[in-house]
Amino acid sequence: MESTSELPVSLIPNHGSWLRYLSFSLDHKVVGIQYLVTGFLFYLVGGALAGMIRTELATPISDYLSREVYNEVLTMHGTIMIFLWIVPVVNGAFGNYLIPFYVGARDMAFPRLNAVAFWMIPPAGLLLIASFFIGGASQSGWTAYPPLSLRTPALGQLIWIFSVLLLGGSSILGGINFIVTILKLRRPGLKMMQLPMYCWAMLGTSILVVLSTPVLAGTLVMLAFDIVAHTGFFNPAIGGNAVVYQHLFWFYSHPAVYIMVLPAFGLVSEILPVHARKPLFGYTTMVYSILAIVFLGLIVWAHHMFTSGTPPWMRLFFTIATSFIAVPTGIKFFNWLATLWGGKIALNSSMLFACAFIVNFVLGGITGVALAQVPFDIHVHDTYFVVAHFHYIVYGGTVFIIFSSIYHWYPKITGRMLNEPLGIIHFVFTFVGFNLCFGPQHWLGMNGMPRRVSEYDPQFTLMNQISSVGALLMALSTLPFLINVFHSAWHGRVAGDNPWRALTPEWLTSSPPPVENWKGQAPHVEHPYGYGLVETNP
Amino acid sequence: MLDWLTILTLRASVITVLVSVGLILVGLAVGQRVDMLPVQASINAPVYDELFRVLFSIGTMLFLGICGLLVYSLVRFRRQPEDFGDGAAIEGNLPLEIVWTAIPAVVVLFVGLYSYNIYERMGGMAPLADHSVMHAMPASDPGSDDRVWGGISTISGETADLTVDVTALQFAFIFHYPEGNITTGELHVPEGERVELRMKANDVIHAFWVPQFRIKQDIIPGQPTVLTFTANRPGTYPIICAELCGPYHGGMRTSVVVHDRGAFDQWLTKNTPPVA
Ligand code: HEM
Ligand SMILES: [Cu+2]
Ligand SMILES: [Cu+2]
């Protein structure tokens, strides 16, 4: 199998220069960082769009953006955050950086495919953003439900479809690469049940990616045909069925929410043991609960459609299946708490974000189980309650873990530590801003504010303004983070190989690691979580 | 003879029991007091709110329990300066893990059964109980051939006291009363009577939502739907479109006016167009 270790260093483009980050690099670490930085740039764009949404909603009337532009902004915000920030970073960035270390390989199974997968992302993202300036972006929401998506300006919608297809293609290529790397590239003697938990999370996620993304791709191609060739798959005016689109869309997009969160479950499983100095509690049940989530995640999609005219037996089935996801999810949370229990916990920036993840996600999980109950959902479906739910999951869960991971792995990536006081300021602003922004939205939804609106009943003004202030704090929180990342890159304390005294293999090499990951043989790590069992040098 | 270990274990169990009981009491108390939903204006609303209270109680218990445990651990087990040792090397505990697989399983099972019961009381399960009805759905709607049913407040076999045709379009609702041939942009209904909305859309998907009734149903082009409700509190409530339907989606709202019977009859007579 091809891997960079067999290439002479001179063949690796721009080896040693920062230009390698702009090249078609085959080094998994470079590709990982390419994903991370690209994702973060798109996060800034998506965040600016969120700022525009919250500015519009600071007053009850539609006064800041035109209504069409508001819907464009709303659609682009969702699409960018999901497909260009969360999915690429939590899968592509950390997956590419860490998985080869974890399986004891020098690179991914298919380095060229890997570079191709990454390089599909920037053009797709730029195209999407460009659509704002060439005739207007899509206005039909990130869900693009027909017939609305057949009636809004066609060019923006087609560009949206094309770029989501590119991003989906990239994610399928990445998924295949992860599956093969984890199953086939393990260092001889390394058993599946000795892999760090993030590998299991990525295996589960990649299975979901490979099974469900093609369905989205097919659906979007059909939607494109409806737009350009006037076929009638989803167009009721000529005999099509609009609800079928929803089934197909959610068959991908519910698994997609697990594509966004399972890797975060994996990352937090790496972070907690290191900073609590304890083995990951219940490794085996953790593995089985990931597999259970993968299976259940494939059979719950219609909980997004309880008001779409689904037949009663279907509502019943999807309520039960959805509720049961709480069981494997609950196991993971109790295991993390048990990992902390009796440890020696260093409450640094990375841990603060990881622990806040637990708090936020539990709240999002509770509202999730409530939403799974048909009679409960009927009232709050398509309201700000749902907006609150999924931001508690996606932002409070996954984005918090992305930040936690950056604080954790930055020393490995750059060789320098991030500044702790700045990290704590970043955390406080993010945590307070996040809860101010999304907490009140639960109330708004229950009391009558639908989602995706640019104007609302004046009785909701106060809560919306609190929410907008929270958004402002979240925007401000980015400043200490950016200052920290740039300042520490040159002036941060030198990290050394293993500043956290961690046991997983990426720490058993220099920081930053050499192209071939380890000088000499890959280390044999049988106990990636063996705190208290294995010697760790202070 | 009690040795120290037994005493410690005993103490731990007592604390665990006390904390759990405390959590349950707090959860129940909070659930009883929570008041976050708009006024109840349909027979469906109190049933909904009961479910909400129960879910809120359970949610409070879980949330406080988990956050409490987390914060306690962070404080109690924080690393002391200059301590570079490791914590206890506990890799798992099968009985414990079985316990916390069982807890969510039981909770979820209870929530599922309970919400099934709620849904049944809302009328949502009627067609499932009766197979002949299920196939010829919806039974209470003999007039329509192929309508998909909104799943709330339909008791099979019952017929509506008032039927209204609803057409949703970008960006308005139009209500037509076959009885009296009235067309209006504002829905008027009598208090305490079963109203059946037969809904259709011609352009894009919309949704009919009255927060005070706790009901919602999408209005889907090519797929007529019905929604039934019984309003029981006179007043004026918003009707809100809850499905993104275009630029003016946020402005797509009107009102439902709930009258007592006399006032409704007056409204009906006043608005019935004279027969030509
Ligand atoms: C405890 C597990 C969870 C349950 C039971 C659950 C349940 C639900 C339900 C029933 C809905 C539909 C609500 C509605 O539209 O009326 C929903 C929406 C949503 N959930 Fe979750 N959820 C869970 C976890 C997650 C996770 C892990 C994510 C993502 C990382 C997530 C992201 C979303 C998103 C994005 C939506 C809204 C999609 C949209 O309409 O645009 N949820 N969830
Ligand atoms: Cu879902
Ligand atoms: Cu609408």
Image (tube, coloured by chain):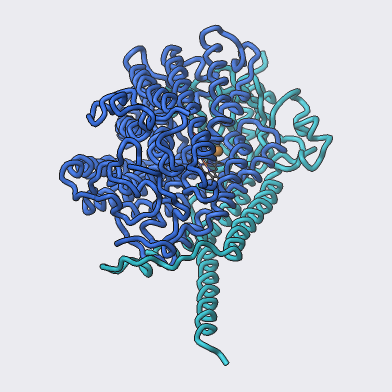
Chain colours: A blue, B cyan
In which quadrant is the C terminus of chain A drawn? bottom left
Q: Residue furthest left?
A: A491
Where A325 falls versus A534 (above or below)?
Answer: above
Where A81 falls versus A230 (above or below)?
Answer: below
Front-most of residues A2 and A124: A2
Q: Residue at x 30, y 31 (%)?
A: A41
> In the rendered view, does B64 fall on the left or right side of A350?
right
The image quarter in which residue B149 lies: top right
| Residue B161 image position (x, y, % from top left) | 72, 35
Front-most of residues A531 and A469: A531
- All told, the count of numbered labels is 0
| Residue B138 image position (x, y, % from top left) | 75, 32
Q: Residue furthest bottom?
A: B1
Front-most of residues B60 and A301: A301
The image quarter in which residue A321 lies: top right
> In the rendered view, does A33 fall on the left or right side of B179?
left
**Can residue A388 be seen from the camera position used here?**
no
Q: Residue at x 82, y 37 (%)?
A: B131
> In the rendered view, does B85 fall on the left or right side of B59?
left
Q: Residue at x 55, y 11 (%)?
A: A225
